[in-house]
Amino acid sequence: MMRAVTAIEVRRAKPDDAEALVRLRALMLEAMGMGEDIGGADAPWRDVAVRYFTEGLASPQTFVAFVVDDPEAGVVAGAAGHCNLHAPSPKDLSSTRGTVYNVSTEPAFRRRGLARACVVALLDWFRDETDVGQLELHATQAGDALYRALGFVASTYPAQRLVIVR
């Protein structure tokens, strides 16, 4: 069932929004095809993620999340980002890069521009309140058009990953 949204009001997330951000993260991970790996509400990663978001949101110069609330459902959409140190290059003299992630909307509230509004607020924060020279993100197929419309382009050097087993 789709729920009506009358006006999009984006607000900066607070540390007590951490659990909602983890719920949205689980939806995003599921959309990325990790459904069987996310586990239930008691999955160990969720407690670690709540701490991550709580601590991150307490560092407003380097970490931010923007959310949209529904009066009945609470937080229904969000996007997060953080700054990280990075060596300068000839095309980017800044030593700070930004990462956009955790962009997700509750299924009943999708296709209304909520995620876009959160990402735009996030991009404004990076531009207006940080020294970030470049932003990076990983997009699902469903989110690709949104990011391209906002100016993101495919990277020449796609990300690779190595999981360190301890």
Image (cartoon, rainbow, N blue to C red):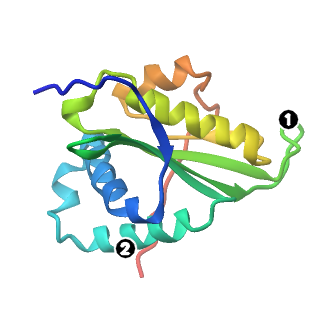
**Mark number for residue 91?**
1
Mark closer to the observer (2, 1): 2
Is disc 2 placed on a helix, strand or loop? helix
Considering only vertical position in the picture, is 133 above or below 155?
A: below
Say whether residue 44 is left or right of residue 100: left
Tell which of 145 and 103 is nearer to you. Answer: 103
The local secondary structure at tag 1 comes to loop
> Which label's residue is closer to the chain start, 2 or 1?
2
Quarter of the image where one finds residue 72: top left
Amino acid type, residue under disc 1 in the picture: Lys
The residue under the point 57% across, 22% down is 150
Q: Is residue 116 left or right of residue 44?
A: right
Label 1 Cα neighbours within 10 Å, binned few <14 / some 14-19 / many ≥20:
few
Residue 48 disc label: 2
User: Residue 121, percent across and down?
Assistant: 57, 36
Q: Residue 94, image x and y in percent?
A: 84, 47
